[in-house]
Each structure stands twice: as structure tokens, then as C-alpha cells.
Amino acid sequence: MTEAGETSYHRGVNLSERVIVLTGASSGIGRATALALGRRGARIALAARREPLLQTLADEVFRAGGEGLVAPTDVADDHQVRQLVQATIDRWGHIDVVIGNAGIWHHGAIEETGPDLWEKIMRIDYLSNVSLTLAALPFMTHGGHFIFMNSLDGKRGVPAEGAYAAAKHALTGFTGVARQELAERGIAVTGIHAGRVDTAMIERLDVPSVQRKTSAETAAKAVISAIRRPRPEVYVPAVRGRLYVWFSTLTPGFADRLLRPLHLEGRMG
């Protein structure tokens, strides 16, 4: 038996020489994932805006045993996303896995977040993944896999993260529908819902011990695991993340009253 969304042709995937498109590759979870993939011999199109960092990363991926294509990309620009996919095809001829990892984060109350920022976060954290899917899908075949780096905020938002949570909820909805539609073509779709990950994006955020930060390397391991054995959803941390979502879904009002004193939104230092 396999879990819903997992199919026999995806099980036990060998990462050696798999062609992977990875956005948000220059730092944080993306960088850790690229290095983990490189150690397993993958060929990776490394996409982010900062070309010098990508070049350094490509060199590290090569030394680790993989191959990296430097692909400077602003995922908010649909044209550049299409160029990223085309550059991958020009280099390797096909795409096996797409990892939508690029994202931005904002900490601020709803009324303190201007319309332009709401739109920017939605553009990068959600719509860029739609653009990436539409661009890559014509080149994806039976056995392909889309992975979207989401957040526990994509299941339940916390105060001061309204814009971020809204974009991640949209990504959750898109991922669920894409998973159902693409299953008929033999293409897997996975959403990875991570809690606080210790990256530069939230380095100034102090969080309570109940929601302590996870390392980028731990999140990268979850991505590798998902590629090797696709599942509909992956939680980081696995047990704590699932319990948090389960509790919040079953008793949202009680969860509000219980979790609010814990200040899960954290405090900016």
C-alpha cells in the first residue's frame, strides 16, 4: 500500500544525475538543499537574484559531487521564470524535479501592512510558484515531481503574519489541486510545511521555546526525503508540526485561547 499521492514509480528515487530546478537557492533552506542534492550527484538549476552567491554555491555543489547551473532569476518576473526553465532544458534536455523555495516574510499587524506589501508577498510566495509550474509542466513527464516549500502558516496563521499566512494558504490550496490533477499524468506534488527555520530571513525574530527554530539542514533533509518518497504533505518538525496543525484544525477557538499566551508570533529583536 502507498500513501495517497504516492505512486510506485516514484518510490526509492535515485538522486544521482536527476535534473532539478531550485528557486531561492542562494541562502537558507535553498542553499542547504542544493548542497544536500549535490552530495547525491544531482544536476541543479540554481535560481535566485544574487548571481555571485549562486556562482559560489555552484562551485560548492561541484566539489560535493553534483553539477550546478547558475541561473540568476527574479521569480516575481514571469519572463525570467520561463527563461530559468528554458536554460535548464537547454543544458540538460529535461526536468525531473521542481522545488519552489523562493519566498519573503514580513512581521507586522494587518493594519500596519500596506497594500503594496500584501501584493509583493503574494507575488513571490504564491504566484511565482504558479508561474514556475506553468513554465515547467510542458517539460515534465511521468515520474516528475513538484515540491513547494510552504509553512505551518499555510495551515494556521499567527498574529503579525497576515500577509505571509495569506500567501502560504493560497499555496496550500494550489498544491492540493495540482496534486490531484497531475496525478493522472504520473507527476507527484508535495507541500512541505515548515515551522520556524533558522535562516537570515527571521534572524531577528525571538520565538518561544515551544516553537524553537529548526536548522536549514533539517529542512533540507525533509526535501531530500520527499524527493525519494513523495508524499502529499511533509511537516518540519515532523511530530510537533503535525500535532500543531491537528490541534488547531480540530479546535480553532480553543487553540486561539491556548496558544495566544505563548506568543507564537514571536518578537522582533
Image (spheres, rainbow, N blue to C red):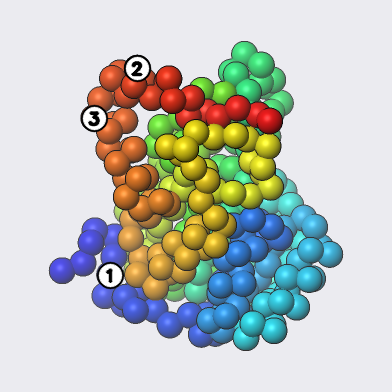
For marks 1 and 2 on the same chain, the one whose residue lies earlier in the sequence: 1
For disc 1, the neighbor class at 10 Å (few under 14, some 14 to 19, many from 20) is some
Would you name the residue on which mark 1 appears? 7
Q: CA distance from mark 1 to mark 3?
A: 29 Å
Q: Is residue 58 left or right of residue 223?
A: right
| Secondary structure category for the residue under label 2 | helix
Q: Amino acid at mark 2?
A: Arg
Where residue 148 sits in the image (x, y, percent)?
49, 54
One can see residue 152 in this view: yes
Q: CA distance from mark 3 to mark 2?
A: 14 Å
Q: Which mark is residue 250?
A: 3
* Residue depicted at 54% across the width and 35% down the height: 207
Marks 3, 2: nearer the viewer: 2
Where residue 61 sits in the image (x, y, percent)?
67, 77
Marks 1, 2: nearer the viewer: 2
Residue closest to the eye, 28 or 231: 28
Residue closest to the eye, 186 or 39: 39
Q: Amino acid at mark 1?
A: Thr
Where residue 172 sits in the image (x, y, percent)?
42, 42
Residue closest to the eye, 67 or 225: 225
Tell me the quarter of the picture where residue 253 sits: top left
For marks 1 and 3 on the same chain, the one whose residue lies earlier in the sequence: 1
* Residue depicted at 43% across the width and 82% down the height: 14
Q: Amino acid at mark 3?
A: Leu
Would you name the residue on which mark 2 appears? 257
| Secondary structure category for the residue under label 1 | loop
Q: Is residue 87 left or right of residue 192?
A: right
Where residue 117 sits in the image (x, y, percent)?
69, 28
Q: CA distance from mark 1 to mark 2?
A: 40 Å
Give the residue at the far front of this rendering. 209
Tell me the quarter of the picture where residue 52 sits: bottom right
For marks 3 and 2 on the same chain, the one whose residue lies earlier in the sequence: 3
